[in-house]
Image: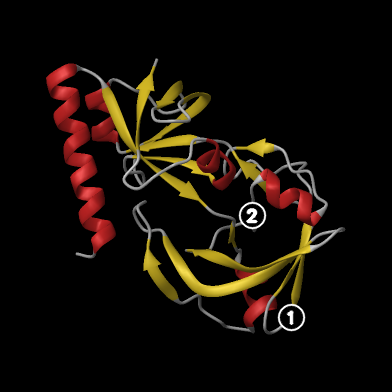
Amino acid sequence: MDKAQVQRSVQLAVSEAIFRKTGKIFVPVASSARHIHLCRADVEKLFGKGYQLQEFKKLSQPGQFACKEQVTVVGPKGQLQKVRVLGPERPDTQVEIALTDSFALGIRPPVRMSGKTAGTPGCTLVGPAGSAEVKEGVIVAARHLHLSSEQAALFGLKDGQVVKLRSEGERAVIFDQVVVRAGKGHDMEVHIDTDEANCIAMGPSPMMEVLP
């Protein structure tokens, strides 16, 4: 078990202990940097026919992993280089960026939950073997809280429920419109983007309180 896994195990244990003692819900928070999910067709366009994504490291959500592969995202105004691909492959390609990134690209994506890409702007992806035109799929990911079914039941939260999150510290803030994503394939962790993490001056081992 590496350092990140140990830290995560400690955070989950602390969260459950606090809840059972006080009834308050504190959850670990992660800053999600710009990244890409690729469909099979775009994997082959970018890396070659029959190419398989290579795992770089496991992520907190079950079955998810960061890949060794990185690509360039090109927009009307500029580009972002070395954007990490996440696996496994998905039915549709999706590019998740922060609003700050959108200014550099010249793209104004909406804030959406992952997978809700209908009507969103597109971009061009460039890899070592070629390029792929993404007609739609560029989004700013809506802040959300992952929970397993057991964690959701413990806290009395439901999939799709909207809650608030409170951070403490020198730049304390309350985030509204945080969507709960609970069930199989999820494990306790809040995902915010890099702009939001900078907003709260997020430090190491961050946790936030869930408000109804």
Disc 2 marks a residue whose amino acid type is Gln
Q: Position of residue 22 (x, y in %)?
A: 17, 18
Total numbered labels placed on residues in the image: 2
Q: Nearer the viewer, residue 121 or 119?
A: 121
Q: Residue at x 24, y 52 (%)?
A: 7
**Disc 1 target residue:** 130
Q: Position of residue 151 (x, y in %)?
A: 25, 33
* Dot label at residue 94: 2
Does 50 sit above or below residue 87? below
Q: Is residue 206 above or below residue 177?
A: below
Above or below residue 46? Residue 174 is above
Q: Amino acid at mark 1?
A: Gly
* Residue 44 spot, x, y in % from top left: 64, 77
Furthest residue in direction right, as rendered: 76
- Structural crowding at the residue carrying mark 1, measured as other residues with C-alpha within 10 Å and reported as few (<14), some (14–19) or many (≥20): some
Task: Characterize the local packing of mark 2: few (<14), some (14-19) or many (20 or more) Cα atoms within 10 angstroms.
Answer: many
SS at mark 2?
strand
**For residue 183, above or below residue 77:** above
* Label placed on residue 80: none
Q: Residue at x 23, y 42 (%)?
A: 11
Quarter of the figure with the C terminus: top left
SS at badge 1: loop
